[in-house]
Amino acid sequence: MQSATGAPPVAGGEQIQREWYWLNGEQKKPIDVRAWMRYEPTQEIHLSMSYTAMQMEERTEGVVVDLAYFSSPPSPYKVCRANPIEVVNPNHSLKDGLAIAGYPKDLWYAPLHQLPPMAKHGKVVTGFYQIHRDYVDMLKELNEYLGDPQNRNDPTAREPCRRRVVILIEIERAKHFFGDVDRFRRKRTSTPTVALADAGEHDSVPPGEAVFQWWWGDPMTGWGHWKNYHPHVSAHLEKMLATREGFRSCHESVAIDEVRYRIQRISRERPFDYLQQNLAGNFRETFMPEHIVTIDNSMFDDMTRATSNCFVQFQNGNPKRRRPVRRIKKGDAAGLEMPSGEPCTICFSDTGVLTGCEKGHVVCHSCLRMGMRVIVGDISTTEGLICGCLSFRDIVALEGLAEKADITTRETLASPPSDPNLKQEFDMELNQVRRQFDIADAIPQGLYKSKMKEWFEKLRQKESEHLYYACKHPGCGMENWILREDFDKDYRCRGLYNWTCRRGHKNSVLPSQDEINDVNKNILLHPECYDERCAHDSFPLRRFRLCEQCVAEGLLTFAVHESGCKQWPGGGASTAGHRHCFCFHCCAVWGRDCDHSKRCRDPGIQQVRKNTTLDGSESKLEVGYIDAQAYIAWIKGTRSVCPPTVFGASGLFSRSEQVVGLTRQGLLGLEDKSYLKRTMEQGTS
C-alpha cells in the first residue's frame, strides 16, 4: 500500500510518512488491533494534505476532509478533529471526565499493543473522528448535552450517533525513497577503473566546477590515484578550451606552464600519437607505438569517454614521458545514453542515461521522467534526488536530466511503443503528467525544463522566506508578502499587528498556538505567591506575570519579579530595558491606572488566547483570569471543581465567556494534580 506524506520535512532532511486508520466494530476498550482499518491511498493523500493545511492555519478543530469528494461512489462520511471537552452532566457515564466526539478521550490513547503495528515506530496524533454526514447535528447536540449539567435530553437515547475513532500515525522515513540504490547493482570487474572510484577520497571536486586531474602513480599497472591540478591551472586550461579551437578539437596541445609540460585533448579519431613526428620533432627520446594513448586506456572510465574529457599531459619536447589527464565537471554526463548494459539504479530493468553523479549511476527513461516529476512537485526535498546522489546544488546535472526527459517524452509521443504493456505504461504516465501539471490537451514541449526552472526559482524564494511574514490566504504568492523589517517599522512600532497584503487579504502577526500554550502552562505551574508582603506596598506577589500592554500589541512578554515593590520594571519603562511599566499585583498600566498610593486588587492567574472578531476579519490576543485561591484549592484536593478561565468582553471581539477548567488543563497537559502540587510546593526560588 502507498504511504501518504503531505508533510514538511523534519530535521536531518527526512520526511514524515503519514498513515490514517479508522476503528471498526465497537468503539470501546480493550481494542482488538485487527479492528484498525487503513484508509485508501487516495483518501490518505487528501487527509494528509488537508491536515497540513490545518497546521499552517493553526486550526485544531473542524472538518479535515469530506470523503465524498475522493471516493467512488461518494462516501457519506467526513473526517474531523476536535479538542477534548469536560463532561459535567451528572446523567452521563463520562461525568467529570474528558470526551472527544462523545467518546472517552482514553480511546485515542490506547496502549501500543492495541494500536496498529506502525504505532511502535512513530507518533500517534489524536483527536480525529469519522462521522456520517446525517449525524453531524446530532453530535453537536450530544456535545451540548455533555457540557450542560441541567440537560436531560441525551440525543443518543433515540438512536446511536454514527461516528468512529480515527488516528494518524506519523513516521520519519529516510530522505531517499529507494534506499541504497547500489545494493543490487552489477559489480564491476577488478580493473584499474576501480581505482578511479577511490580518487575522490584523495582529491575532492568542488560542486559545479570543472577540475583537471592527473594520474599520480603507474599508468601501466593502474596503481595510484587521480590528483587535482592547482585551481589556477584548471582555470587556465578551462580558458584554453573556451578560446582555442585547435585545443578543443584535439588538433593541438597547449602549455601547462612556460617550461616543462603541455597537455592535449584526445578523441577516438585523434589519439595521442607522435609516431610521424619523431624526426621533425627532435624529441629527446623516441616515441614508440606502445606510447600511443587512446580513449580506451584503462585509466579513463565510461563517463570520461562519453563526455570527451580525456587528455594527456606530456613533457615539452619528449611525448614519451606522458600520463593520463581527465577533466571532470559534476553533472556534465547527465542525460548521456549508456548502451553498456548497466541496469537502471531505480527499477533495475532497462539501461538508460547517466545521472551525472560521481558514482556513474544510470537511470532508465521512464524512471528519469518519474524522478523529474517527484523533484519539481516538492521543494521540501532537496537532497537524495533521482539516484540518491544528487542535490539542489547539482544545477548542471538536473538541467541536463530535465532536457533529456523532454527529449524522450517528445520521441515517445512521436513513436509510441508497439508493445501493448509498454504502451499502457506510457499512457498511464501521460495521465499522471496531465493530472500533476493540470494539462488538458497536448503535452507542451520543454515541459520538464520549464518545471525545473520554476523549481529552482521556488527554492531561491524559499531561502529568503525567513525575511518575510507570509500571507495566510491559500495561494497568495511571495510577491504579496511583507518584509519583517517593514512590518516592524510600519506596524509594530505603532502597536499594530494586523496587516493587509497587496491582494487585499487581511493578516495578523501573532504568536503561534504552541507559544501561547507554553506561556499559559508556565504560569499555571506556579500559582502561588513567592512573596507574601512585597517591599513598600506590602502586597503578595507571584513570580510570573504577562505584560498586558505587550499582549495588546500582539506580543508575549514573560515578566519575572525578583524583589522590591509592585512596580515592574522597578526603574520604570525608560530605564530598565522594557518599554512598558505595570503593576505586578493588578497588572494595570503604571502611572495611569495604578501607583503606590492605590490599594489595588489581584485579578487572578493570567491566561492568554488568540481570538477573532465576530465578523471574522481580525485576530488579537486576549487575557483572561483564573480564581487563584480556587485553583490552588483544586490542586490540593480541597475543592472538587477546577475553576474556569474567564475572558471579559472586548469591543468587537467577543462576549464575556469562560473556558471550562478541566478542558483547559487537558489541552495544556496539566491534569496530574500530584505533579502540580509538587511543582507548586517546590516554588520558584
Image (tube, rainbow, N blue to C red):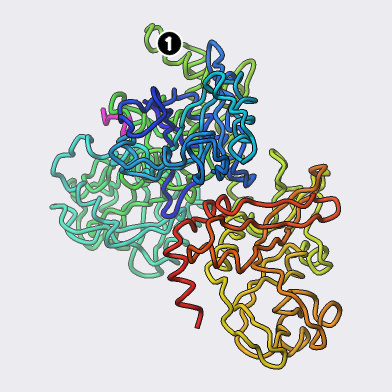
Percent x, y of residue 298: 21, 45
In the displayed structure, does residue 174 sit left or right of residue 288? right
Magenta stretch contains residue 340: yes
Residue in the foreground of this view, choosing between 100 and 274: 100
In the displayed structure, does residue 214 sit left or right of residue 17? left
Q: Quadrant of the N terminus?
A: top left
Measuring 70% from the left and 65% from the top, which residue is drawn there? 555
Measuring 80% from the left and 81% from the top, which residue is drawn there? 590
In the displayed structure, does residue 598 sit left or right of residue 632? right
Prevailing secondary structure of the magenta residues: loop
Instruction: Identify the amino acid type marked 1.
Output: Gln
Residue in the foreground of this view, choosing between 429 and 664: 664
Mark 1 Cα-neighbour bin, 10 Å: few <14, some 14–19, many ≥20: few
Q: Quadrant of residue 551?
A: bottom right
Please report the bounds of the magenta region as a residue range.
339-346
Measuring 56% from the left and 17% from the top, which residue is drawn there? 76
Residue in the foreground of this view, choosing between 173 and 654: 654
In the displayed structure, does residue 56 sit left or right of residue 260? right
Q: State the SS at label 1.
A: helix
Residue under label 1: 424
Residue in the foreground of this view, choosing between 480 and 274: 480
Q: Quadrant of residue 188?
A: top left
